Amino acid sequence: MNRRLFSPRLPALALALALALLLAVPACQRDLPPDAAYRALVRAMAERDEEAAWDLLSSATQGRLTDRARVAAEAAPGVVPPSARAMLAGDAPLGVRPPTSITVVESGPDRAVLRVEAPGAKPGEVVLVRERGGFRVDLPVE
C-alpha cells in the first residue's frame, strides 16, 4: 500500500472534519425527526429559551401567537408584552410537563402527527409540518 495515500490518521481526520461540518450547521436547521423536534420544543420552553422555542414553531403558529399577543397587549397595555416571543418566556414554561411517551401516529415527508402523553394531562395529538428545512410544531392557538 502506498504510504503517502494512506495514513492511520486519515480516518480520524475525516471524522473530525465531518463532525466540524455538522456542528457548523445551526441546530435549528438540522432535520430532526418529528419526535425529536417536539422534545426540543418542550426543552426550550422549560428552559425559557424563547429564540429556540420560536424557531421550532410553524409559521402558522407564529402568526397566530403574534396576533394573540397583539390583542392581549391592546387589552392590557403595559401589562402584557406585545411580543409573542416574550410571551413564550413568561409563565407558560412553568406548566410544561415533559412527555412520558411520544408515539409517531402518522409520518410523511411534509407532515407528522404524534400522540403525546404527559403526567397529569390527557393524551393528545401534536401536528408537525416541514418548514425551513425541518419539522416545526403546528399548535392550535385558542
Image (spheres, helix red, strand yellow):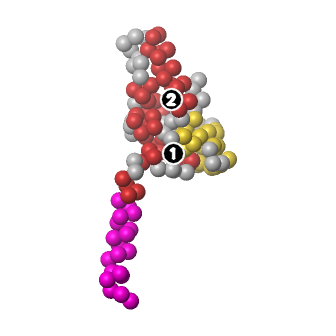
Q: Determine the secondary structure under disc 1.
A: loop
Give the quadrant of residue 91.
top left
Query: Residue 30 versus residue 84: which sits nearer the camera?
Result: 30
Q: Magenta segment range? A: 1-20
Vertical order, 23 against 139 (above or below): below
Q: Is residue 13 magenta?
A: yes
Q: Is residue 77 magenta?
A: no
Vertical order, 59 against 18 (above or below): above
Type of amino acid at the residue the image marks with label 1: Gly
N-term mark: 2 or 1: 2
Q: Residue at x 45, y 37 (%)?
A: 55
Give the quadrant of residue 120.
top right
Direction right: furthest residue: 106
Query: Residue 118 versus residue 10: which sits nearer the camera?
Result: 10
Q: Position of residue 103 (x, y in %)?
A: 63, 49
Give the quadrant of residue 117.
top right
Q: Determine the secondary structure under disc 2.
A: helix
Query: Which quarter shows the N terminus?
Result: bottom left
Q: Position of residue 14 (x, y in %)?
A: 37, 69
Mark 1: few/some/many CA within 10 Å (<14, 14-19, 20+) = few
Query: Which quarter shows the C terminus?
Result: top right
Q: Residue at x 52, y 26 (%)?
A: 63
Q: Position of residue 16 (x, y in %)?
A: 35, 66
Q: Which residue is mark 1?
A: 133
Residue 109 left/right relative to 77: right
Q: Which mark is residue 62?
A: 2
| Cα distance in 3D space between marks 2 and 1 | 16 Å
